[in-house]
Image (cartoon, grey):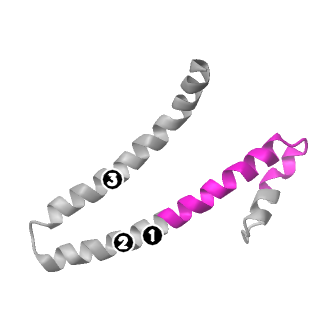
Amino acid sequence: MFADVRKIAALAWPVLIGQLAIIAFGVIDTAMVGRYSAVDLAALGLGSSIYISVYIGLTGILTALQPIAAQLYGAPATPRTARKCASRCGSPWR
C-alpha cells in the first residue's frame, strides 16, 4: 500500500504545487492592488473571477480527457490515439 502512495505522490506533487501557486497568485495580487484604491481592487476581483471561471472550465475538460487518453493509450492501436482523442473531445484538429 505504501508503495502505491509513493507512486501517486510522485505524480501528484507538481499538481499540488501548481494549485498552491494559483492560490498564492490571487492572494499576492489582492494584497498588492488593495493598497491603491477600491476601484482597482474591484477591477482585480472582476478579472480574477473571469480568469478562475476559464481556468476551472479548462481544468474540467482536461480532467475528463485523462481517462479517455489513458484508455486509448493502453489500447492495442496506439498510432491512432491522438486522432481518436481529438475526435472525442470535439477538436477541429483531427
Q: Residues within 10 Å of mark 1 (few under 14, many from 20)?
A: few
Residue at 53% of width from left, 66% of height from top?
A: 57
Q: Are marks 3 and 1 in contact (CB under 8 Å)?
A: no
Q: CA distance from mark 3 to mark 1?
A: 14 Å
Where does residue 42 sit, x and y in percent of width and height?
A: 22, 77
Q: Which of the pair 64/44 is nearer the observer?
A: 64
Secondary structure type for disc 1: helix
Q: Which part of the image, by quadrant, shows the C terminus?
A: bottom right
Q: Is residue 71 magenta?
A: yes
Q: Give the residue type that dot 3 points to.
A: Ile
- In magenta, the rendered stretch is 56-82
Residue picked out by circle 1: 53
Q: Which residue position holds label 2?
A: 49
Q: Residue 75 location, x and y as percent?
A: 86, 43
Q: Residue 49 in magenta?
A: no
Vertical position of residue 15 compared to residue 83: above or below: above
Q: Residue at x 85, y 47 (%)?
A: 79
Give the camera-side residue of 10 and 86.
10
Q: Residue at x 9, y 70 (%)?
A: 36
Q: What residue is shown with label 3?
A: 23
